[in-house]
Amino acid sequence: MKKLSVATQLPDGSEAKRTDDLGTKLIEDIPVQGRKIVYQSYLDYGTMVIAIEVSCERWISEDFGTEMAKTMDYPGNPGFRTEYVFESFSRQEPDPALFAPPRDYKIVKPQPKRAAPR
């Protein structure tokens, strides 16, 4: 399998501390390549700024060129985690009818605006 770039754009002012290759696994029978990036970010509370360490784990499909899963952990904010994973992903072409206008769709030419009565 050819290596796909799984770089993560870090928020402005953030500093990458560590990058780990997580190898490959299957999500919905699709091979994906993983990378975990730990970076330092900052929370601005107006009266003070706190440095926190954030962990971002991404799983990318080379076949589809898309992110199939992502997990963000914020240890500076215990219990706060963002996670998503593709489910019911299909390799089939979608039904073309999904992209066609409805049968009763009509193009109507706009009427010229009339001047308001005086």
Image: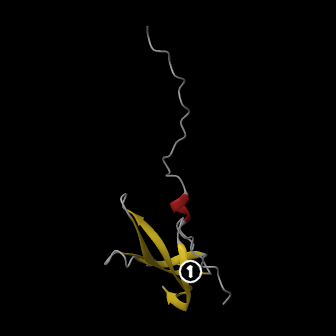
Give the tally of numbered discs: 1
Image quadrant holding the C terminus, namely top left
Q: Name the residue under label 1.
A: 60
Please tell me which residue lies in front, 90 or 9: 9
Tell me which corner region of the image, top left, top right, bottom left or bottom right, holds residue 96: bottom right
Q: Please report the residue visible at 37 percent of the width from the left and 57 percent of the height from the top.
A: 46
Up the image or down, 70 lies above or below 2; here it is above
Q: Position of residue 83 (x, y in %)?
A: 40, 76
Q: Position of residue 84 (x, y in %)?
A: 42, 76
Please tell me which residue lies in front, 52 or 61: 52
In this picture, residue 106 sits left or right of residue 72: right
Q: Where is residue 37 in the image (x, y as percent from the top left)?
A: 52, 81
Is residue 66 in view from this perspective?
A: yes
In this picture, residue 54 sits left or right of residue 95: left
Image quadrant holding the N terminus, namely bottom right
Q: Please report the residue visible at 32 percent of the width from the left and 78 percent of the height from the top.
A: 78
Residue type pointed to by label 1:
Ile
Tell me which corner region of the image, top left, top right, bottom left or bottom right, holds residue 49: bottom left
